[in-house]
Image (cartoon, helix red, strand yellow):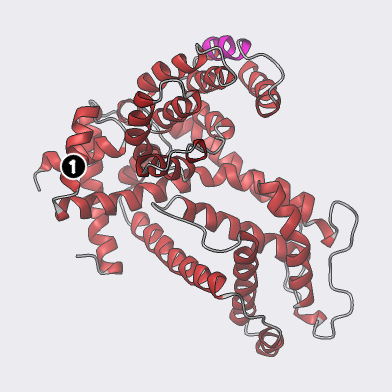
């Protein structure tokens, strides 16, 4: 393999390879085992890095839920869930274990480190983006088309493999121009792979459809603006989202507060 | 979705862990780590859940707790919980085996990444967070996106050598 092949793979996995070159590269993968092996190895690493990057925000969410559902062995409905009459319990075994306050504090410390680190290494706006960028699953197959490309797009998108989702979603959207949800997923995929210019172009199209998905176009445009530290633009997009959508309403209020701080 | 999992799984896991010499806090830790590990699994290409998620989470929590007791050399207590160990459905068992392989792979990835230079780690972490190559170039004082691709490629060649050493890649 030539050095340019490796650089093309990097650009592809960053979602930054032009679409004509993407098609050429994907076609080569089917006939060149060496290229396929390198793609596969690097995909493995990239997936791991992406999952790791999202872990702090997930831990924060889980800590909150853990405090709610595991506190003192009592379920939120008041039902005691601990064992009460099991003879196998040996009381002296109990390890020195942190309680939930400590866990919550640790989670907060991890989050704080992440945010403080974010200011140094990544920019505060990136952690705000991570906090709010929770995508609803895509379900194209429910619309009755069993084409493998659609299944691949859906599986890739729902599993966070956004660069892999871009090509099949682009092809699907070209054939199904009226499918605003698929177009939204394409915009999100561009956003997640750092191709903000394409993301903004596609999300603007979604926002301008005027249908029920349009508020989501504006929501993701706001998130793109947040990530680029353009607070006035973020607020403008948030202002365009009408109330009434249960998924968005609370999130819009919270993001507006964060942006205004 | 997450809250639903907590609502459905927490009572059973608390009950099992506290019945086997643990606390509700232990159960919470086990449950959280199980979800974090599944979050990593879900990012793998082609990942599909092949058994009910509740059953898989319970199996992970239970086996991890047994391992913790074993590490603490509480042999008699391990025997107690082993005696009470239930046999999962075969689909759950094979999903659990795959989960164990994924944990091993995750450890190897983390170990190999930790051996890279600080510059490589910063660059990979930045790109992993979805920052564009052009933006990464700006943040790391590199000339442009092409420099980022070249630097990342050099980092990944080194990473491959390290990972190959652990994993037998050819």
Looking at the image, which residue sits at the far front?
Answer: A144
Q: Nearer the viewer, residue B112 or B17?
A: B17
Residue A21 at x, y percent in the picture? 19, 31
Say which residue appears at 24% left-offset and 57% top-offset: B160
Task: Name the residue beneath numbered marker 1.
Answer: A27
Task: Answer with the quarter of the image where residue B16 lies.
Answer: bottom right
Does A236 lie within the magenta span? yes
Label 1 crowding class (10 Å Cα cut-off): few <14, some 14-19, many 20+? few
In magenta, the rendered stretch is A232-239
Q: Is residue B44 left or right of residue A43?
A: right
Q: Quadrant of the C terminus of chain A?
A: top right
Residue A104 seen from this side: no
> On screen, B119 above or below A66?
above
Q: Nearer the viewer, residue A233 or A104?
A: A233
> On screen, A251 above or below A72?
above
Q: Is residue A152 left or right of residue A101?
A: left
Which secondary structure type mostly characterizes the magenta part of the structure?
A: helix
Q: Nearer the viewer, residue A95 or A215?
A: A215
Say which residue appears at 57% left-offset and 16% top-offset: A211
Residue A58 at x, y percent in the picture? 59, 45
Say which residue appears at 81% left-offset and 81% top-offset: A89
Residue A164 at x, y percent in the picture? 35, 40
- Chain for numbered disc 1: A
Task: Answer with the quarter of the image where residue A157 lies.
Answer: top left
Say which residue appears at 84% left-offset and 68% top-offset: A82
Looking at the image, which residue sits at the far left?
Answer: A2
Does B22 lie within the magenta span? no
Tag count: 1
Q: Is residue A232 left or right of residue A254?
A: left
Residue B50 at x, y percent in the picture? 51, 62
Residue A26 seen from this side: yes
């Amino acid at each position: 393999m030539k050095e340019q092949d490796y650089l093309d793979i990097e650009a592809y996995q960053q979602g930054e390879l032009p679409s004509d070159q993407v098609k050429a590269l994907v076609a080569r993968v089917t006939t060149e085992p060496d290229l396929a092996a390198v793609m596969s190895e690097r995909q493995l690493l990239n997936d791991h890095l992406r999952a790791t990057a999202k872990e702090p925000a997930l831990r924060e969410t889980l800590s909150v839920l853990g405090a709610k559902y595991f506190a003192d062995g009592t379920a939120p409905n008041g039902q005691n869930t601990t064992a009460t009459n099991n003879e196998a319990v040996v009381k002296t075994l109990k390890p020195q274990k942190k309680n939930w306050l400590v866990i919550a504090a640790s989670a907060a410390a991890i989050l704080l480190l992440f945010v403080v680190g974010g200011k140094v290494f990544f920019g505060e706006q990136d952690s705000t983006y991570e906090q709010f960028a929770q995508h609803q699953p895509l379900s194209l197959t429910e619309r009755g088309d069993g084409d493998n490309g659609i299944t691949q797009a859906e599986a890739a998108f729902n599993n966070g493999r956004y660069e892999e989702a871009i090509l099949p979603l682009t092809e699907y959207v070209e054939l199904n121009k009226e499918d605003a949800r698929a177009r939204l997923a394409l915009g999100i995929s561009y956003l997640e792979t750092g191709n903000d210019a394409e993301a903004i172009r596609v999300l603007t199209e979604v926002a301008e459809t005027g249908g029920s998905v349009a508020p989501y176009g504006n929501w993701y445009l706001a998130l793109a603006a947040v990530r680029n530290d353009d607070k006035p633009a973020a607020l403008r997009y948030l202002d365009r989202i009408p109330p009434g959508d249960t998924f968005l309403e609370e999130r819009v209020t919270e993001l507006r507060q964060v942006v205004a701080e | 979705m997450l809250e639903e999992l907590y609502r459905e799984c927490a009572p059973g896991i608390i009950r099992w862990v506290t019945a086997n010499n643990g606390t509700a806090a232990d159960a919470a830790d086990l449950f959280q780590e199980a979800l974090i590990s599944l979050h990593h699994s879900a990012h793998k290409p082609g990942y599909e859940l092949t058994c009910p998620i509740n059953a898989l989470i319970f199996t992970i929590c239970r086996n991890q707790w047994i391992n913790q007791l074993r590490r603490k050399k509480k042999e008699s207590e391990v025997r107690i919980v082993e005696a009470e160990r239930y046999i999962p459905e075969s689909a759950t068992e094979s999903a659990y085996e795959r989960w164990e392989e994924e944990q091993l792979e995750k450890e190897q990835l983390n170990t190999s990444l930790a051996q890279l230079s600080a510059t490589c780690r910063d660059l990979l972490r930045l790109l992993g967070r979805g920052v564009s190559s052009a933006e990464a170039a700006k943040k790391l004082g590199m000339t442009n996106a092409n420099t980022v691709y070249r630097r990342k490629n050099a980092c990944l060649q080194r990473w491959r050598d390290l990972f190959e050493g652990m994993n037998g890649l050819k």
